[in-house]
Image: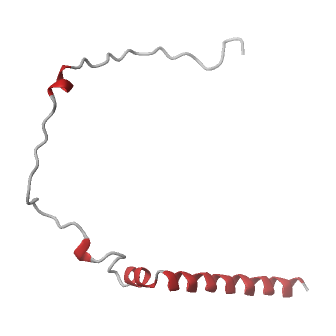
């Protein structure tokens, strides 16, 4: 009786697994199949291409940022978490 129940539960779990896999394939079939074929989910034309940029934009720091004083970091003495009486 226990073996029959275990076999039935195994069959139900396998059926649910196959149903989930088929539902995933139905929703994202092109992305999944292209990933399995090694192409990836995104086409190569939309990826950034290596190499120098067409226009180079140089960034300047504002003078206001240079004049602001920087905070001084102080060292904090570490104290034990438990008291000596504990």
Q: Quadrant of residue 29?
A: bottom left
Q: In this view, does 39 lie above or below 53?
A: below
Q: In which quarter of the image is residue 33?
A: bottom left
> Residue drawn 18% across and 20% down?
67
Residue that extends furthest to the top in the rendered view of this protein: 85
Location of residue 37 in the rendering, given as x and y in whole percent from the top left corner:
36, 85
Q: Which quadrant does the C terminus fall into?
A: top right
Location of residue 45 in the rendering, given as x and y in whole percent from the top left corner:
22, 76
Q: Image check: 14 left or right of 59?
A: right
Q: Is residue 61 above or below residue 73?
A: below
Location of residue 65 in the rendering, given as x and y in whole percent from the top left corner:
20, 26
> Residue drawn 51% across and 84% down?
25
> Residue drawn 55% across and 15% down?
79
Q: In this view, does 83 lie above or below 37?
A: above
Q: Which quadrant does the N terminus fall into?
A: bottom right
All told, the count of numbered labels is 0
Q: Image check: 68 left or right of 37?
A: left
Between 40 and 26, the one nearer to me in the picture: 26
Q: In this view, does 61 lie above or below 4?
A: above
| Scheme of image coloration | secondary structure
Between 79 and 63, the one nearer to me in the picture: 63
Location of residue 61 in the rendering, given as x and y in whole percent from the top left corner:
15, 33
């Amino acid at each position: 009786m226990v073996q029959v129940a275990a076999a039935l539960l195994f069959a139900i779990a396998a059926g649910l697994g196959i149903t989930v896999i088929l539902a995933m394939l139905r929703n994202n079939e092109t992305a999944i199949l292209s990933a399995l074929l090694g192409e990836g989910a995104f086409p190569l034309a939309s990826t950034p291409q290596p190499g120098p940029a067409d226009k180079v934009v140089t960034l300047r720091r504002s003078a206001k940022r240079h004049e602001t004083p920087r905070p001084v970091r102080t060292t904090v003495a570490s104290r034990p978490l438990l008291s000596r009486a504990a």
